[in-house]
């Protein structure tokens, strides 16, 4: 790279013959005097004053002033924190209020339920037909005065065991003062003859009552093996599947096995077979009796091929 040519020298700055030509920097003594202006930086104070220097015209700071300043600073900090946490505090307050209301509601409900305000004053029996409802209500009279929530199911069960006709029952509390007992009675399927008389039984073989004479409307059961046999179970299912019109005509049920159930309807004999397809067999029997009123025997053991003779 070529060095640039030197700048031209003004005529009045041309050196004389007596003055040698000087190259390079000017001599130190020929440097023109520079005017230096010093500007002090402004401090973070009023009118550029140094915060570390106290104005002589102001009163000196006391411990009380320092305390007030610190208190004002803390107050401002708390205000900022409160402003930024306002939403979360509101949300927390809503949750706490809801939880408190729920606890209060549960506590109040529990106290009211276990208090005499909801004590039993009336026992109502629903579903009794063969049984006398007043007798069942009298047996449960001990529950009167007991809070509905404290009714002892064990005591109720012990009182209802005295009624063999009751198959199942359910308790319903109806505030403020009513206890409802819904019962399902056992369905008798016939009577068993023995030396002590006639015992009324249901399909499970439970003895419901014993009388000296055969109860009206109840067929005589002649089952080999008694109530504990499979033949009795099959016969019970057959009797319970009969429609009301056929059930009213039933006078005798015989069974030697599960597949050999025979019914007597007045003067007519019906070979039923097993308890399977009993609904279809009852429908076929109804049609056969209507179509053959003078027939004395019917065979519906195979419902697809009903026979009247």
Image (cartoon, rainbow, N blue to C red):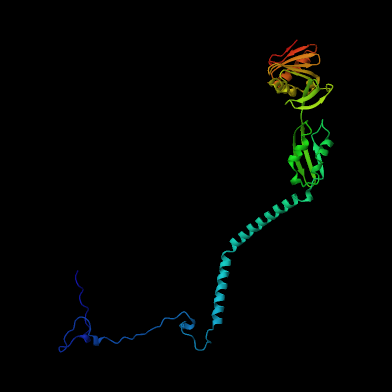
49 or 243, nearer to the observer: 243
Percent coordinates x, y for residue 208 in the rendering: 78, 28
Residue 51 in the image, given as x and y percentages of width and height = 47, 82
x and y, in percent, of residue 307 in the image: 72, 12
- In this picture, residue 53 sits left or right of residue 82: left
292 on left or right of 6:
right
Quadrant where the image shows the N terminus? bottom left
Residue 146 place in picture, x, y as percent = 78, 46
Q: Quadrant of residue 301?
A: top right
Q: Nearer the viewer, residue 268 or 4?
A: 268
Q: What count of labels does the image hold? A: 0
Tell me the residue at 73%/40% (across/down). Answer: 154
- Taking the view exactly as shown, the residue that stands out farthest to the front is 195
Residue lying farthest left? 17
Looking at the image, which residue is at 55% across and 78% down?
A: 69
Left or right relative to 14: residue 72: right
Q: Is residue 143 above or below residue 51?
A: above
Residue, far top: 309
Height in image: 108 above or below 259? Answer: below
Where does the C terminus fall, quadrant-wise?
A: top right
Residue at (58% x, 66% y) in the render: 83
Relative to the observer, which residue lies in front, 224 or 102? 224
- Seen from the viewer's position, the closer of residues 56 and 48 is 56
User: Which residue: 72% across, 51% down?
Assistant: 110
Q: Quadrant of residue 76?
A: bottom right
């Amino acid at each position: 790279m070529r060095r640039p040519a030197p700048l031209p020298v003004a005529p009045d700055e041309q050196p004389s013959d007596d003055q040698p030509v000087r190259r390079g920097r000017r001599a130190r003594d020929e440097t023109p005097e520079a005017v230096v202006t010093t500007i002090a930086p402004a401090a973070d104070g009023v009118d550029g004053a140094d915060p570390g220097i106290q104005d002589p015209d102001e009163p000196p700071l006391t411990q009380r002033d320092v305390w007030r300043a610190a208190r004002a600073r803390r107050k401002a900090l708390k205000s900022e924190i409160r402003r930024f946490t306002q939403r979360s505090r509101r949300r927390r307050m809503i949750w706490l209020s809801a939880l408190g209301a729920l606890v209060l509601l549960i506590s109040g409900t529990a106290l009211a339920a276990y208090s005499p305000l909801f004590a039993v004053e009336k026992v109502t029996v629903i579903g009794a037909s063969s049984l006398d409802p007043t007798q069942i209500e009298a047996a449960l009279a001990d529950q009167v005065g007991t809070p509905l929530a404290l009714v002892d199911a064990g005591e109720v069960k012990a009182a209802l065991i005295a009624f063999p006709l009751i198959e199942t029952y359910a308790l319903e509390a109806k505030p403020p003062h009513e206890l409802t007992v819904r019962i399902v009675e056992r369905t008798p399927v016939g009577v068993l003859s023995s030396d002590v008389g006639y015992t009324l039984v249901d399909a499970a073989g439970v003895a419901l009552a014993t009388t000296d004479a055969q109860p009206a409307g109840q067929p005589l059961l002649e089952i080999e093996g008694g109530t504990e046999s499979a033949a009795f179970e099959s016969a019970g299912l057959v009797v319970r599947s009969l429609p009301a019109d056929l059930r009213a005509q039933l006078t005798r049920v015989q069974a030697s096995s599960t597949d050999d159930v025979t019914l007597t309807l007045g003067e007519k004999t019906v070979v039923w077979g097993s308890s399977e397809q009993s609904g279809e067999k009852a429908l076929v029997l109804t049609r056969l009796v209507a179509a053959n009123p003078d027939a004395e025997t019917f065979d519906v053991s195979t419902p697809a091929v009903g026979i009247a003779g």
